[in-house]
Amino acid sequence: MHYRVALVTLLLTAASVLANVLPSPIHTGGELQPFTSNVVTGTFRGQQHCYVCSLVLNHPAVVVFSRQIDGPTTRLVQHLDGFLHEHMKDNLVCWTVFLGAAGSDAEVALEDRAYAFATGNHLDVLPITVLGDPQGPPGYRIPASVHVLALITHGRRILQSCSFDKAHWNNAAADTITADIHRVLRLN
């Protein structure tokens, strides 16, 4: 009898954890569509650049879309910067896109915040970009309910897509994405 209670408790716990992850608007098995964003840090700083266009077929990649610069996002982005340091030999490509409102004033303000965020957190390898479209790049149609979307790819092929709403975006969620990146890309 006790094992049934334990099993039901385990299943309910697993269901609540899975409920924290929203259905992703970008599906596993699909392909990343090319898009440009305004580069705030990195080699292409001050330019619009398409990181998807430069992905090589057999290279692993991670792109994170976020609506806010907050504690859990900082945690995830710092992990990505660390991954890039550790896995340069593996040709890992990562970048972060902060989504904001359209309009030149809003985009400039977002660029300023993103640059201050990157320099304040000593992100010296991970490119930070911004995009003045709350739905993300054309064709992505990221719903307003999605606070953070992480896409783990091999070349342009999407191996895993993780999305969280604002209520469930926390350090544990950021750590889940970090663990998924290790597991899916088999990073040591």
Image (spheres, rainbow, N blue to C red):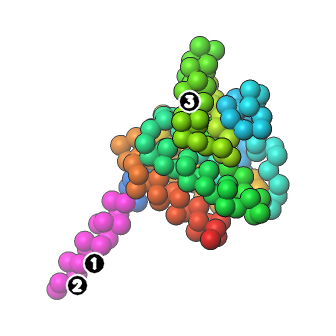
Which span is picked out in magenta? Answer: 1-17
Residues 52 and 3: in front is: 52
Q: Please state, as top left, top right, bottom left or bottom right, where the C terminus lies in the image.
A: bottom right
Q: Find residue 45 and report its horizontal and vertical position in percent.
A: 74, 31
Residue kind at label 2, given as amino acid type: Tyr
Tag 1's secondary structure? helix
Give the mark nearer the N terminus: 3 vs 2. 2
The answer to whether 164 is drawn above or below residue 107 in the figure is: below
**Contact flag, marks 2 and 1 (Cβ < 8 Å):** yes
Query: Picture quarter containing residue 121?
Result: top right
The answer to whether 183 is drawn above or below residue 154 in the figure is: below
Image point (80%, 62%), residue name:
58
Q: Nearer the viewer, mark 3 or mark 2?
A: 3
| Mark pair 3, 2: CA separation | 53 Å
Give the mark nearer the N terminus: 3 vs 1. 1
Question: What crowding class fits label 2: few (fewer than 14 Cα within 10 Å), some (14-19), or many (20 or more)?
Answer: few
Q: Which residue is mark 1?
A: 7
Predominant SS along the magenta part: helix
Tag 3's secondary structure? helix
Is 39 placed left or right of 75 in the picture? right
Q: Which residue is mark 2?
A: 3
The answer to whether 143 is drawn above or below residue 113 in the figure is: below
Q: Can residue 131 be seen at all in this image of the molecule?
A: yes
Residue 21 sits inside the magenta stretch: no
| Mark pair 3, 1: CA separation | 48 Å
Image point (52%, 50%), residue name:
76
Question: What crowding class fits label 1: few (fewer than 14 Cα within 10 Å), some (14-19), or many (20 or more)?
Answer: few
Query: Picture quarter containing residue 37?
Result: top right
Q: Find residue 68 and report its horizontal and vertical position in percent.
A: 48, 34
Which label number is shown at residue 116?
A: 3
**Contact flag, marks 3 and 1 (Cβ < 8 Å):** no
Q: Can residue 138 be seen at all in this image of the molecule?
A: no
